[in-house]
Protein backbone atom coordinates (compact mmCIF):
# COMPACT_ATOMS: atom_id res chain seq x y z
CA UNK A 1 0.00 0.00 0.00
CA UNK A 2 1.22 3.53 -0.79
CA UNK A 3 1.51 5.26 2.59
CA UNK A 4 2.26 8.78 3.75
CA UNK A 5 3.66 8.69 7.27
CA UNK A 6 3.17 11.66 9.61
CA UNK A 7 4.96 11.70 12.97
CA UNK A 8 7.74 13.48 14.85
CA UNK A 9 9.06 12.14 18.21
CA UNK A 10 10.75 8.91 19.32
CA UNK A 11 7.34 7.32 19.91
CA UNK A 12 6.66 7.41 16.16
CA UNK A 13 9.92 5.82 14.98
CA UNK A 14 9.03 2.10 15.47
CA UNK A 15 5.83 2.72 13.50
CA UNK A 16 7.79 4.27 10.63
CA UNK A 17 10.20 1.33 10.61
CA UNK A 18 7.35 -1.22 10.55
CA UNK A 19 5.57 0.56 7.70
CA UNK A 20 8.80 0.87 5.72
CA UNK A 21 9.37 -2.88 6.06
CA UNK A 22 5.89 -3.85 4.84
CA UNK A 23 4.56 -1.02 2.65
CA UNK A 24 5.67 1.70 0.26
CA UNK A 25 6.20 4.87 2.30
CA UNK A 26 6.05 7.54 -0.40
CA UNK A 27 6.79 10.48 1.90
CA UNK A 28 7.36 11.30 5.57
CA UNK A 29 5.94 14.42 7.19
CA UNK A 30 7.28 15.67 10.53
CA UNK A 31 7.84 18.80 12.58
CA UNK A 32 10.60 21.15 11.34
CA UNK A 33 14.06 21.02 12.93
CA UNK A 34 14.29 23.24 16.00
CA UNK A 35 17.16 24.69 18.08
CA UNK A 36 18.37 22.25 20.73
CA UNK A 37 21.38 21.55 22.92
CA UNK A 38 23.94 23.98 24.26
CA UNK A 39 24.75 25.38 20.86
CA UNK A 40 21.07 25.87 20.01
CA UNK A 41 21.66 24.43 16.55
CA UNK A 42 18.70 23.19 14.55
CA UNK A 43 18.12 19.52 15.34
CA UNK A 44 15.86 17.29 13.23
CA UNK A 45 13.13 15.30 14.90
CA UNK A 46 13.80 11.60 15.57
CA UNK A 47 11.42 10.72 12.74
CA UNK A 48 13.26 12.93 10.25
CA UNK A 49 16.61 11.47 11.26
CA UNK A 50 15.35 7.90 10.88
CA UNK A 51 13.51 8.59 7.62
CA UNK A 52 16.62 10.10 6.05
CA UNK A 53 18.67 7.10 7.23
CA UNK A 54 16.14 4.86 5.45
CA UNK A 55 16.40 6.97 2.29
CA UNK A 56 12.81 8.24 2.48
CA UNK A 57 11.74 11.69 1.26
CA UNK A 58 10.93 14.07 4.13
CA UNK A 59 8.80 17.20 4.29
CA UNK A 60 8.37 19.41 7.35
CA UNK A 61 5.99 22.28 6.59
CA UNK A 62 5.19 24.59 9.51
CA UNK A 63 1.51 24.41 8.58
CA UNK A 64 -0.73 22.26 6.40
CA UNK A 65 -3.21 25.05 5.66
CA UNK A 66 -1.51 26.58 2.63
CA UNK A 67 -3.17 25.49 -0.67
CA UNK A 68 0.19 24.67 -2.25
CA UNK A 69 1.12 22.39 0.70
CA UNK A 70 -2.22 20.61 0.39
CA UNK A 71 -1.76 20.22 -3.37
CA UNK A 72 1.70 18.69 -2.85
CA UNK A 73 0.24 16.26 -0.34
CA UNK A 74 -2.60 15.22 -2.67
CA UNK A 75 -0.18 14.76 -5.56
CA UNK A 76 1.56 11.93 -3.67
CA UNK A 77 -1.37 9.69 -4.57
CA UNK A 78 -1.29 7.89 -1.22
CA UNK A 79 -3.80 5.17 -0.48
CA UNK A 80 -3.65 6.00 3.22
CA UNK A 81 -1.88 8.28 5.67
CA UNK A 82 -0.71 6.96 9.05
CA UNK A 83 -0.44 9.61 11.74
CA UNK A 84 1.15 9.20 15.16
CA UNK A 85 2.23 12.09 17.42
CA UNK A 86 2.70 14.38 14.42
CA UNK A 87 2.09 17.70 16.15
CA UNK A 88 0.01 19.57 13.55
CA UNK A 89 -3.75 19.71 13.02
CA UNK A 90 -4.77 18.08 9.73
CA UNK A 91 -7.21 20.33 7.83
CA UNK A 92 -10.04 18.72 5.89
CA UNK A 93 -8.30 18.79 2.46
CA UNK A 94 -5.44 16.74 3.97
CA UNK A 95 -7.87 14.33 5.63
CA UNK A 96 -9.71 13.87 2.35
CA UNK A 97 -6.68 13.38 0.10
CA UNK A 98 -5.70 9.71 0.71
CA UNK A 99 -8.00 7.21 -0.98
CA UNK A 100 -8.48 5.18 2.23
CA UNK A 101 -8.33 8.13 4.62
CA UNK A 102 -6.00 9.02 7.49
CA UNK A 103 -5.43 6.55 10.34
CA UNK A 104 -4.22 7.74 13.72
CA UNK A 105 -2.39 5.66 16.32
CA UNK A 106 -3.43 6.99 19.72
CA UNK A 107 -1.90 5.85 23.02
CA UNK A 108 -5.04 5.55 25.14
CA UNK A 109 -8.35 3.73 25.34
CA UNK A 110 -10.50 6.32 23.62
CA UNK A 111 -12.52 8.32 24.50
CA UNK A 112 -10.39 8.44 27.68
CA UNK A 113 -7.39 10.75 27.36
CA UNK A 114 -7.91 12.44 24.04
CA UNK A 115 -5.20 15.00 23.41
CA UNK A 116 -1.50 15.62 23.80
CA UNK A 117 -0.24 13.62 26.81
CA UNK A 118 -2.28 10.42 27.22
CA UNK A 119 0.56 8.32 28.67
CA UNK A 120 1.45 10.87 31.34
CA UNK A 121 -2.17 11.43 32.29
CA UNK A 122 -3.01 7.73 32.56
CA UNK A 123 -0.23 7.18 35.13
CA UNK A 124 -0.90 10.43 36.99
CA UNK A 125 -4.58 9.51 37.33
CA UNK A 126 -3.79 6.03 38.64
CA UNK A 127 -5.37 4.18 35.71
CA UNK A 128 -4.86 0.43 35.93
CA UNK A 129 -4.87 -0.07 32.17
CA UNK A 130 -4.33 1.79 28.94
CA UNK A 131 -3.71 0.75 25.36
CA UNK A 132 -3.58 1.66 21.69
CA UNK A 133 -6.48 2.69 19.48
CA UNK A 134 -6.30 2.83 15.70
CA UNK A 135 -8.68 5.63 14.81
CA UNK A 136 -10.12 6.88 11.55
CA UNK A 137 -9.32 10.58 11.65
CA UNK A 138 -11.85 13.38 11.34
CA UNK A 139 -11.73 17.10 12.03
CA UNK A 140 -12.30 16.88 15.81
CA UNK A 141 -9.53 16.28 18.37
CA UNK A 142 -9.21 12.48 18.59
CA UNK A 143 -12.95 12.10 18.05
CA UNK A 144 -12.97 9.73 15.07
CA UNK A 145 -14.37 6.18 15.05
CA UNK A 146 -12.09 3.42 16.32
CA UNK A 147 -11.06 0.62 13.92
CA UNK A 148 -8.97 -1.49 16.28
CA UNK A 149 -8.02 -1.40 19.96
CA UNK A 150 -5.75 -3.33 22.30
CA UNK A 151 -5.48 -2.98 26.09
CA UNK A 152 -2.48 -3.39 28.38
CA UNK A 153 -2.00 -3.30 32.16
CA UNK A 154 -0.02 -0.43 33.72
CA UNK A 155 2.56 -1.92 36.10
CA UNK A 156 2.82 -0.63 39.69
CA UNK A 157 6.35 0.72 39.13
CA UNK A 158 6.01 1.62 35.46
CA UNK A 159 7.12 5.10 34.39
CA UNK A 160 6.09 7.15 31.36
CA UNK A 161 9.33 6.05 29.69
CA UNK A 162 8.55 2.36 30.24
CA UNK A 163 4.95 2.63 29.07
CA UNK A 164 5.92 4.88 26.15
CA UNK A 165 8.23 2.20 24.75
CA UNK A 166 5.70 -0.62 25.18
CA UNK A 167 2.87 1.32 23.58
CA UNK A 168 5.08 2.44 20.69
CA UNK A 169 5.88 -1.18 19.78
CA UNK A 170 2.23 -2.12 20.26
CA UNK A 171 1.15 0.67 17.92
CA UNK A 172 3.59 -0.49 15.24
CA UNK A 173 2.23 -4.02 15.43
CA UNK A 174 -1.41 -2.95 15.52
CA UNK A 175 -1.24 -0.58 12.53
CA UNK A 176 0.16 -3.36 10.34
CA UNK A 177 -2.80 -5.53 11.27
CA UNK A 178 -5.23 -2.68 10.65
CA UNK A 179 -3.86 -1.98 7.18
CA UNK A 180 -3.88 -5.67 6.28
CA UNK A 181 -7.56 -6.06 7.24
CA UNK A 182 -8.75 -2.56 6.41
CA UNK A 183 -11.55 -3.78 4.14
CA UNK A 184 -13.01 -5.90 6.93
CA UNK A 185 -12.82 -3.42 9.82
CA UNK A 186 -16.03 -1.74 10.94
CA UNK A 187 -15.47 1.76 12.39
CA UNK A 188 -16.95 1.99 15.90
CA UNK A 189 -18.08 5.48 16.99
CA UNK A 190 -16.59 6.55 20.30
CA UNK A 191 -18.98 6.61 23.28
CA UNK A 192 -20.20 10.03 24.34
CA UNK A 193 -19.63 9.13 27.99
CA UNK A 194 -16.20 8.81 29.58
CA UNK A 195 -14.48 11.54 27.56
CA UNK A 196 -11.37 13.00 29.23
CA UNK A 197 -8.66 15.28 27.85
CA UNK A 198 -4.94 14.74 28.31
CA UNK A 199 -3.59 18.26 28.53
CA UNK A 200 0.09 18.79 27.80
CA UNK A 201 2.23 18.35 30.91
CA UNK A 202 3.83 21.55 32.23
CA UNK A 203 6.88 22.10 34.41
CA UNK A 204 4.59 23.83 36.92
CA UNK A 205 3.17 20.38 37.80
CA UNK A 206 6.57 18.88 38.61
CA UNK A 207 7.14 20.03 42.20
CA UNK A 208 6.40 17.19 44.65
CA UNK A 209 3.90 17.98 47.41
CA UNK A 210 4.96 15.64 50.22
CA UNK A 211 1.75 16.35 52.17
CA UNK A 212 -0.15 14.23 49.63
CA UNK A 213 -0.70 10.47 50.19
CA UNK A 214 2.17 8.22 49.15
CA UNK A 215 0.16 6.66 46.29
CA UNK A 216 -0.36 10.11 44.75
CA UNK A 217 3.30 11.11 45.19
CA UNK A 218 4.38 7.81 43.64
CA UNK A 219 2.14 8.41 40.61
CA UNK A 220 3.55 11.93 40.19
CA UNK A 221 7.10 10.60 40.17
CA UNK A 222 6.32 7.84 37.66
CA UNK A 223 3.95 9.99 35.60
CA UNK A 224 6.53 12.73 34.98
CA UNK A 225 9.56 10.53 34.36
CA UNK A 226 11.79 11.17 32.53
CA UNK A 227 10.42 14.56 31.45
CA UNK A 228 9.86 17.08 32.93
CA UNK A 229 10.82 15.03 36.00
CA UNK A 230 9.18 15.43 39.42
CA UNK A 231 11.50 17.39 41.71
CA UNK A 232 12.07 18.25 45.32
CA UNK A 233 14.57 20.31 47.32
CA UNK A 234 17.12 18.32 49.34
CA UNK A 235 19.87 20.14 51.23
CA UNK A 236 18.86 23.25 49.30
CA UNK A 237 19.44 21.56 45.92
CA UNK A 238 16.77 20.67 43.38
CA UNK A 239 16.75 16.91 42.79
CA UNK A 240 14.64 15.07 40.22
CA UNK A 241 12.97 11.89 41.43
CA UNK A 242 12.73 9.60 38.39
CA UNK A 243 11.77 6.20 39.76
CA UNK A 244 10.28 4.97 43.00
CA UNK A 245 7.90 2.61 44.71
CA UNK A 246 5.47 2.63 47.61
CA UNK A 247 7.13 1.85 50.94
CA UNK A 248 6.21 1.35 54.56
CA UNK A 249 6.84 4.10 57.09
CA UNK A 250 5.33 7.20 58.63
CA UNK A 251 6.73 10.59 59.48
CA UNK A 252 6.34 14.31 58.91
CA UNK A 253 5.69 15.03 55.21
CA UNK A 254 9.03 15.17 53.40
CA UNK A 255 10.99 13.61 56.29
CA UNK A 256 13.85 11.34 55.23
CA UNK A 257 13.20 8.09 57.10
CA UNK A 258 16.39 6.42 55.85
CA UNK A 259 18.35 6.51 52.60
CA UNK A 260 15.88 7.74 50.00
CA UNK A 261 12.73 6.52 51.79
CA UNK A 262 10.70 9.67 52.32
CA UNK A 263 7.52 10.16 54.33
CA UNK A 264 4.39 11.54 52.68
CA UNK A 265 1.10 12.82 54.09
CA UNK A 266 0.33 9.16 54.67
CA UNK A 267 2.74 6.34 53.99
CA UNK A 268 6.11 6.71 52.27
CA UNK A 269 7.88 6.26 48.96
CA UNK A 270 11.27 4.71 48.26
CA UNK A 271 13.19 6.56 45.53
CA UNK A 272 15.21 4.20 43.35
CA UNK A 273 16.49 6.63 40.68
CA UNK A 274 17.32 10.30 41.25
CA UNK A 275 19.18 13.06 39.43
CA UNK A 276 21.00 16.09 40.85
CA UNK A 277 21.22 19.27 38.79
CA UNK A 278 23.90 18.98 36.12
CA UNK A 279 24.41 15.26 36.85
CA UNK A 280 23.23 12.07 35.19
CA UNK A 281 20.46 9.93 36.73
CA UNK A 282 21.79 7.60 39.45
CA UNK A 283 20.49 4.52 41.19
CA UNK A 284 19.75 5.03 44.89
CA UNK A 285 22.98 3.62 46.37
CA UNK A 286 25.24 5.50 43.95
CA UNK A 287 23.28 8.70 44.52
CA UNK A 288 23.63 8.45 48.31
CA UNK A 289 27.40 7.87 48.13
CA UNK A 290 27.84 11.37 46.73
CA UNK A 291 24.86 12.97 48.46
CA UNK A 292 24.36 11.56 51.96
CA UNK A 293 20.99 12.25 53.58
CA UNK A 294 20.92 11.84 57.36
CA UNK A 295 17.75 10.50 58.89
CA UNK A 296 15.39 13.36 59.70
CA UNK A 297 16.51 15.53 56.78
CA UNK A 298 13.58 17.17 55.01
CA UNK A 299 12.55 17.26 51.37
CA UNK A 300 10.49 20.29 50.40
CA UNK A 301 8.85 21.62 47.24
CA UNK A 302 9.72 25.29 47.81
Image (tube, rainbow, N blue to C red):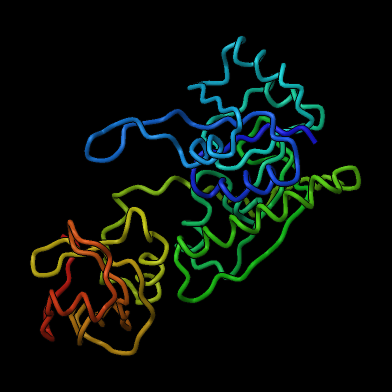
- The number of discs equals 0
Q: Left or right: where does residue 99 sit relative to residue 111?
A: right
The quadrant of the rendering that contains the N terminus is: top right
Q: Vertical placement of 47 versus 268: above or below?
A: above
Name of the residue lying farthest toward the right: 184
Residue occupying image coordinates x 65% and y 15%: 72
Q: Where is residue 119 in the image (x, y as percent from the top left)?
A: 51, 56
Front-most of residues 83 and 4: 4
Q: Where is residue 120 in the image (x, y as percent from the top left)?
A: 46, 56
Q: Left or right: where does residue 61 sit relative to residue 2?
A: left
The quadrant of the rendering that contains the C terminus is: bottom left
Front-most of residues 27 and 196: 27
Residue occupying image coordinates x 71% and y 39%: 103
Front-most of residues 229 and 53: 53
Q: Where is residue 23 in the image (x, y as percent from the top left)?
A: 75, 40
Q: In which quarter of the image is residue 130?
A: bottom right
Front-most of residues 71 and 25: 25
Q: Vertical placement of 293 versus 217: above or below?
A: below
Q: Position of residue 281 (x, y in %)?
A: 28, 65
Q: Quadrant of residue 266?
A: bottom left
Residue occupying image coordinates x 60% and y 27%: 57
Q: Vertical placement of 243 versus 115: above or below?
A: below
Amino acid sequence: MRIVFMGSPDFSVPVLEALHAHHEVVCVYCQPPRPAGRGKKDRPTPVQARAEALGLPVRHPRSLRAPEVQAEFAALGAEAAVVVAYGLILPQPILDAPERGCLNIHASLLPRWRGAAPIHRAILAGDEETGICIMQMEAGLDTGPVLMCEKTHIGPEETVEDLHDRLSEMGARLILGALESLDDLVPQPQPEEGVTYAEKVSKAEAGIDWTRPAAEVDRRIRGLSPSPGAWTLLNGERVKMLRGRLAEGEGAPGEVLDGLRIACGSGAVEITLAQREGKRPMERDEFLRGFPLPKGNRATSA
